[in-house]
Every structure is written in C-alpha cells, then in structure tokens.
Image (tube, helix red, strand yellow):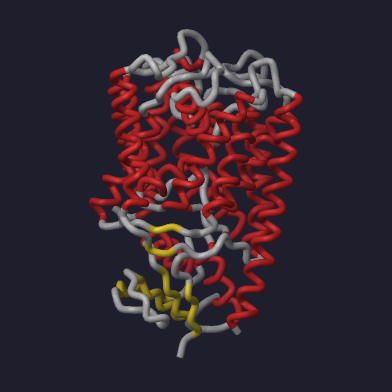
Amino acid sequence: MDQRRVVLVAGAVVGALSVFLAKAGNPANMGICIACFIRDIAGGLGLHRAEVVQYLRPEVPGFIIGSMLAALAAGEFRARGGSSPVLRFVLGFFVMIGALVFLGCPLRMVLRLAGGDLNAVFGILGFTAGIWVGALFLRRGFTLGRSARMPAGNAVALPVFSVLLVILAITAPAFIFFSSKGPGSAHAPVLAALAAGLIVGALAQRSRLCLAGGIRDLILIRDPHLFNGFAAIFGVALILNLVSGGFKLGFAGQPVAHTDGLWNFLGLAAVGLGASLLGGCPLRQCILAGEGDADGVMAFLGMLVGAAFAHNWGIASSAAGPTANGKVATAAALAVMTIIGYMGVRGSGKGKAQAE
Amino acid sequence: MAYRVDARGLSCPQPVVMTKKALDSCGDVQVLVDNATAMENVSRFARHSGCDVDVEASSEAGEDGEGCDCYIIRIHAKGRA
C-alpha cells in the first residue's frame, strides 16, 4: 500500500474507533483524546486529586505498545534521543496546559467538530495560528538539536511502564484512583479500549499520522499528505455521528466543553505552537515514544506532569469556562514557547557559523 | 558533486526544510537522513517539486566515522518547474 492510502486508512480507522469508543462508554466527543486521557492517568496515579478525572485509560498504553510492535515489525524500533530533552519536557508540559484550557488535544478538536461542537472552530483557528507561528521559527532554521543513538533501555522503559499501567487498570489495586462520577467514570470496557489503542498506535506509527503535521506541512511546503489523514478522521467521525445520532450542532451545552471563544483559541494556539516546535502533536509524541524515541518520552512525561499541575493549580477549564489561573498559565505557555522558538533559531544560526 | 545536506538526527520537518532551502539555492542535492519518516518526507517533497529521486539505504559510517542506519537521498533537479 502506498503512503497516501496508509494515511487515509489510518485517519478513517481513528475516526471510526473514536466514535465506537464514545458509544462503548467513553465521554461524548472524547472517544479518543490524548490530553484528556493522559490527564486521567495522572489522576489515576494520584498525581492530582481532581476526583472526576481519574482513570488509567488503557488507550494510551495501547498507543505506545501498538507503536512499538509496528515499529519492531518494520525494523524501525531504535533507541535514540538527546535532542534537548529538558526543553521537550517543558514544551510537553505547556502543550498539556493549553490543551486542558481548551479541553482537548488536537484529535479531540477534530472529534468535537465532527460532533457539531462549534466551539472547536475557535480551537482549530487558534491551533492553525499557533502552527503558523511555529512554521515561522522552522523556516528560520529552528531546531532543538540532533538526536543520537542511545542504549536500548531508553527505548523500552516507557513501553514497560505502559504494560504496568494496563495491568493496574485491569487489577485495580486500592492505591489507584478511579472516578465514580464525571468524565473519569465514563469509559469503554478495558479490553476494548486497549485493543482500540493498539490498533491506533500501530496505524499511526505506519502512517506517521499527525494532526499538527497536517496543517504544518500545508503551510510550510504546501503538502496535503498528512492533512488527508486529518480530513479522513473528520469525515468518518462526522458520518458516523450523523448516522448514530451523536451529532449536535451548536455552541452551548456541548459535552465536556466551554463556550469562551478567546480561550478556546489561545489554548489551542499554545498547543499548535508547542506541537510545531516538538515536531508533532500529542498523539505523535506517544507514537514516537513507542518507537524508541527518548525525546518523545520526555514530551510524554512533560504532558503527564503538566496535566497534574493543571488540576492541582486550578488551571484546567471546566464546562463553566476557563479559570483565572488557566488564563495566566496559557499566557505563560505562549511566552515560554516563543522564547524557546527564538532561542532555537538563534542557536541554529550560531551552530552553522561555527561549522563553517 | 551534488550539494550535501546532513540531516541525520533531525526529525520532521527539519530535514524537509533543509532540503527545500538547498533545492532553492542550488541544483542537485544529496540528503543524508537516519530515519524512515524523514526519508519518506524528503522523497515525497522532492518528487512533488518535480525532481527525480533516488534513495539508497546505507549502513556505512558517515563522514564523522560514526556508524548509522542511514538513507542517502539523491535528488536530481533536472526538469524542475
């Protein structure tokens, strides 16, 4: 199968599984959401104590293990890393902040649109604006530096942790938190969620599916390849929502969403900018982490810790809207990312001058 | 001798941005990458730009003597619009 078809199939399957998972018990328009699910895992592990968003979502370890298996089968599994690990952690942290102010990662943004949630229109505009700014940095030579081969332990640590998460989700020991109400209590059966995660992980690894990359490549090199995957997710989810009655057009009363357009815009602007600098959206970071990319692992850990802070410090939005702390944190996210972008351009210029 | 772009250790989109800059300023370009994603992206970009593309998988040591599982992408700019 050629690359074009692979990315279309991957997008279509992701769209279909997202609607399926929401029907099977996940929150509405949240069949799959990387940010929400990592946030729930942070809660399940007790890193934050927001009682309504605690659950060890098996989808996320599924993405990581599925990606690892696909990469192993294709001979692409390789321990590598060392490209600004600390900055990747920081970017992952602030990407999560932006996502939780919007209430969703870029994938959930598409799923919300496909469910008729028009608040996501502000989100996609912000996401595009953030990527556009990121593309400016990239065009000027922004880089986080080269990665290099690493000892194998760096590649297997997160997949091993993922297996542990699945075991904990199934055995449900007393020290793991499980929401009894709210979005965290709404979930598909464990094995269905795990199977969907594995399939999405493997397909995303093969297709390089990336929500940020889709828009970035359109802006940067006018290449619609990855955007086709983006469009396939939307198209399939939209059709299935229309057929199954999950489509509800409007702004008010949308599931797990708020109606503050400005902060929907700015929250996802931070995600778009951060994802551009990281080289991929939250889903893509999980996939890279599964392929043995230690830099992807750092972004993943940054997102996990960012989610914990977002709830401990009252940064995450709720259906009532964004919080004051959330607005300050989003502004901080945009400022920090802009500084990292600027430094990354300057750093690349310096490196070049020394080499010549 | 083609212009050489060493994009080893870099992940998308930087190898593509570097290739684009090189293609804009000179004719034939040889791009060195060390992951399959970058190889696909650079090849696709070059083909879309109307160039001939030839990819060779190489496990040989690079100029710095460090071994890597690399791809050498030879981009021939002839006939480019």
- A230 is higher (above) or lower (below) than A39: below
Q: Nearer the viewer, residue A3 or A18?
A: A18
Q: Is residue B26 left or right of residue A195?
A: right
Work out whether A112 lies above or below A331: above
* Residue located farthest toward the bottom when viewing the structure as drawn: B1
Q: Is residue A23 visible?
A: no
Say left or right for A116 vs B71. right
Instruction: Locate residue A313, reporting x and y percent.
Output: 66, 26
Q: Is residue A323 above or below residue A210?
A: above
Horizontal side, residue A248 vs residue A297: left or right: right
Residue A311 position, x and y percent, is: 60, 24
Identity of the residue drawn at 64% across and 47% down: A273
Kindly tell me whether residue A259 is visible in this rendering. Answer: yes
Frontmost residue, A13 versus A196: A196
Check the image and name the residue furthest to the left: A73
User: How many dots with numbers?
Assistant: 0
In terms of image quadrants, where is residue A64? top left
Q: Residue furthest front?
A: A175
Nearer to me, A286 or A179:
A179
State the quadrant of the N terminus of chain B: bottom left
Q: Is residue A212 above or below residue A82?
A: above
> On the image, which quarter does residue A84 sit in?
bottom right
Could you tell whether A54 is left or right of A263 in the image? left
The quarter of the picture where the C terminus of chain B appears is bottom right
Q: Position of residue A3 (x, y in %)?
A: 36, 54
Name which residue lies at 26% across and 57% down.
A75
Tell me what residue is drawn at x 56 percent, y 66 percent: B17
Residue B35's image quarter?
Answer: bottom left
